[in-house]
Image (tube, helix red, strand yellow):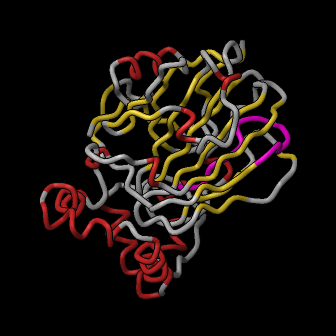
């Protein structure tokens, strides 16, 4: 699939991990029979256990080669398993956080789409429509976010899978929503994705962007969403990480708080994701 690259100002092809397997699961009757087994929590736990075994380290070199991952960005150390590699940390200078207090940053290495939150908004996420209320499980009042912005950051398997707080602030509330783990790949467009996914919903106040709702969504073969327990935090401070698999972070911002960069607005208007990095400026405070 194609995404917009801000550096080259051109479109690039992004490979999809396990594309053939996903096409089998979603594309024929036998695959759909197996789908219920594949998306069960037990299967996810088994996958996680296999990827934590030392023998899984053999999968690291071909994965790096296939997805052209620049290992110069990451800690120079030996990885004892694929899971250890998947949750690797970047060198601090490889993901600088924009220090300008007015700069609204990306929470993760990802591909982002922008939506305006209206009463009748149905966010088109991988071919299906969802309301903001469905994403928060109906447990958080989202009425104050009317006319605000919803930013969907999709992390693919080759992305850095740690994510951050987008500004300095304080935690107000956080809760988990259990669900069947499911895929975030665009190949699954015929299935309801987020309604079946496990997710964590966090409400936090910020110094410069009012109160923000941040939602982490687990995907097929992601065994766990791991968030740090903090009451206060700095801009760009790590919030947590995903275990092996593709994943998504969604951020909801109130109206009149930020202006998103023009290139992201333009690409989102035609349904194209824009590639962004952890800590990179994607908008400006109003």
- Does residue 80 lie above or below 76 as drawn? below
Q: Which of 179 and 16 is in front in this view?
A: 179
- Does residue 105 lie above or below 37 as drawn? above
Q: Where is residue 182 in the image (x, y as percent from the top left)?
A: 40, 57
Quarter of the image where one finds residue 240: bottom right
Q: Position of residue 159 (x, y in %)?
A: 46, 52
**Helix, strand or loop: magenta stretch:** strand
Magenta span of residues: 161-173
Residue 105 lies in the magenta stretch: no
| Residue beneath the point at 55% across and 28% down | 150
Quarter of the image where one finds residue 58: bottom left
Q: In this view, does 73 lie to the left or right of 213?
A: left
- Does residue 10 lie above or below 87 as drawn? above
Q: Which of 92 and 59 is in front in this view?
A: 59
| Residue beneath the point at 79% across and 46% down | 173
Q: Quadrant of the N terminus?
A: top left
| Residue beneath the point at 57% across and 19% down | 260
Q: How many marks?
A: 0
- Does residue 12 lie above or below 147 as drawn? below
Q: Which of 219 and 53 is in front in this view?
A: 219
Residue 171 lies in the magenta stretch: yes
Q: Where is residue 152 in the image (x, y as percent from the top left)?
A: 50, 35
Q: In this view, does 108 lie to the left or right of 219?
A: right
Q: Quadrant of the C terminus?
A: top right
Q: Position of residue 53 (x, y in %)?
A: 48, 86
* Residue sitting at the far front: 138
Q: Is residue 67 left or right of residue 198?
A: left
| Residue beneath the point at 51% across and 69% down | 223
């Amino acid at each position: 699939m194609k995404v917009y690259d801000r550096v080259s100002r051109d479109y690039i092809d992004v490979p999809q991990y396990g594309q053939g397997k996903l096409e089998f699961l979603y594309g024929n009757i036998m695959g759909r029979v197996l789908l219920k087994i594949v998306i069960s929590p037990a299967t996810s736990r088994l996958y996680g256990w296999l990827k934590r075994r030392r023998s899984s380290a053999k999968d690291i070199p071909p994965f790096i080669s296939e997805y052209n991952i620049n290992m110069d960005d990451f800690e120079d150390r030996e990885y004892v398993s694929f899971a250890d590699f998947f949750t690797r940390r970047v060198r601090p200078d490889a993901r600088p956080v924009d220090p300008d207090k007015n700069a609204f940053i990306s929470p993760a290495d990802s591909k982002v789409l922008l939506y305006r939150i209206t009463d009748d908004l149905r966010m088109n996420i991988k071919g299906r429509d969802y309301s903001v209320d469905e994403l928060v499980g109906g447990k958080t009042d989202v009425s104050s976010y009317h006319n605000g912005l919803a930013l969907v950051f999709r992390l693919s398997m080759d992305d850095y899978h740690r994510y951050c707080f987008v500004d300095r602030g304080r935690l107000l509330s956080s809760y988990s929503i259990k669900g069947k783990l499911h895929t975030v790949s665009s190949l699954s467009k015929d299935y309801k994705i987020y309604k079946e996914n496990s997710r964590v919903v966090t409400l936090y106040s910020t110094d410069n962007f009012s109160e923000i709702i941040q939602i982490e969504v687990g995907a097929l073969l992601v065994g766990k969403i791991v968030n740090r327990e903090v009451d206060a935090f700095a801009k760009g401070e790590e919030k947590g990480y995903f275990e092996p698999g593709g994943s998504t972070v969604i951020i909801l911002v109130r109206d009149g708080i930020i202006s998103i960069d023009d290139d992201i607005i333009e690409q989102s208007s035609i349904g194209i994701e824009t590639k962004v990095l952890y800590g990179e400026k994607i908008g400006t405070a109003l």
